Image: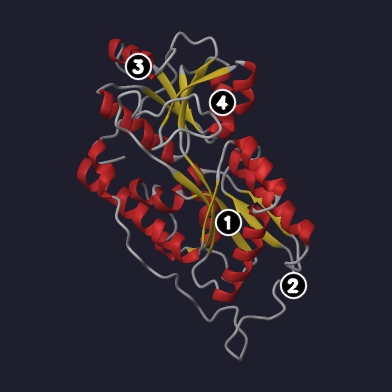
Amino acid sequence: MSAGPRRSRGVAVAALALLTTVACAPSSSSEGQDEAGGTDSNYPERTIEVINPYPAGGTSDILARSLVDSINADGDLGADLQVVNRAGGGGVVGTSDVLSAEPDGYTIGFGPEGPITLNPAIQDVPYDPTTVAPVLQVNSVVPIIAVPGDSPYQDLQDLVDAAEAAPGEISVGEGPIGYSISLTLLEKAAGVEFNRVDYEGDAASLTALLGNNVDAVVTQPAAVLPQLETGGVRVLGIIGEERSEFIPDVPTFTEEGFDVEYSASYIVFGPDGLPQDIVDRLGEAFSAAAGTEAFREVARTAGLPIDEAGADELQQYLDSRSAFAQQLVEENGGL
């Protein structure tokens, strides 16, 4: 099944070992500070925009709204938060809006870290990804490959065999850049070539899959759990180091004979210069929300484990992931 032009990328599987940690403390600024040198003790005094750089209805949107609802219901922050969807450019548009905002704590972002760590390695972006102010990592996620429930492909080897027999003809939908890396790594490990089709997010790619417009998609457990229960889709493999607690019967790529591993994170972040006490206050609020049973149920339903990391640890992760992506580009001419 063909569904549009394929984008070619080169990458070596062994490059995954190049992940390195480069510690770098988040920068600070006097903007938003009072004359005494501290931030306004009355913060927040108005609504805080939480920009989700992906379309409404997707996984990051669902997570963002659950977190915001919990924070607003608790009321301890002192002002409401409002989720604003600004999709486009694979997350670049919304991320740009966050990083170009005043560092006063009234515009922050929530979503996958790809637009900060991966997109800048392969395209021109209208922001400096090193200027992000990390606040909190909330969830981790590993991609999966799924096919329609009536697909002839029963396991990953079946899909690879089909791609080997018909180079460039087996269509696989992909969305955020982390999915693209995962698919590239599989192509290199298996020595095959797929017909790769871009989608803006999980909702769009899953719609295409259920409509039999593509043979398979790279997505995440969150996007397919409801369809798994009804038999609408089947997951062929997990692109992570370990099996998912939410779909424990599905093997990892490594278990199926393909040495491919990848994971990503959902994070809260702000623009450069976000004062430390605002970072701390926002981090505490989002951490408390992530600990509520309401959010944990949303995360369980979405198939995403809670995997918190504070601002300093998140900064180190973002630096190492950015270095990883840049290394891949330099060595292979793309992701």
Which residue position holds label 2? 45
Which residue position holds label 1? 109
Residue 263 picture quarter: top left
**Regarding mark 4 in the picture, which secondary structure is present there?**
helix
Comparing labels 4 and 3, the label whose residue is closer to the camera: 3
- Amino acid marked by disc 3: Gln
Q: What label sits on residue 206 in the rendered view?
A: 4
When the figure is inspected, residue 272 is found, relative to residue 136, above or below; the finding is below
94 with respect to 106 (left or right): left
Tell me how far mark 4 sits from mark 3, CA to CA: 21 Å
- Amino acid marked by disc 2: Glu
Q: Quadrant of the C terminus?
A: top left
Give the residue at x 63% y 59%.
286
Q: Are marks 1 and 4 in contact (CB under 8 Å)?
A: no
Give the residue at x 35% y 26%.
255
Q: Are marks 3 and 2 in contact (CB under 8 Å)?
A: no
Q: Earlier in the sequence, mark 1 or mark 3?
A: 1
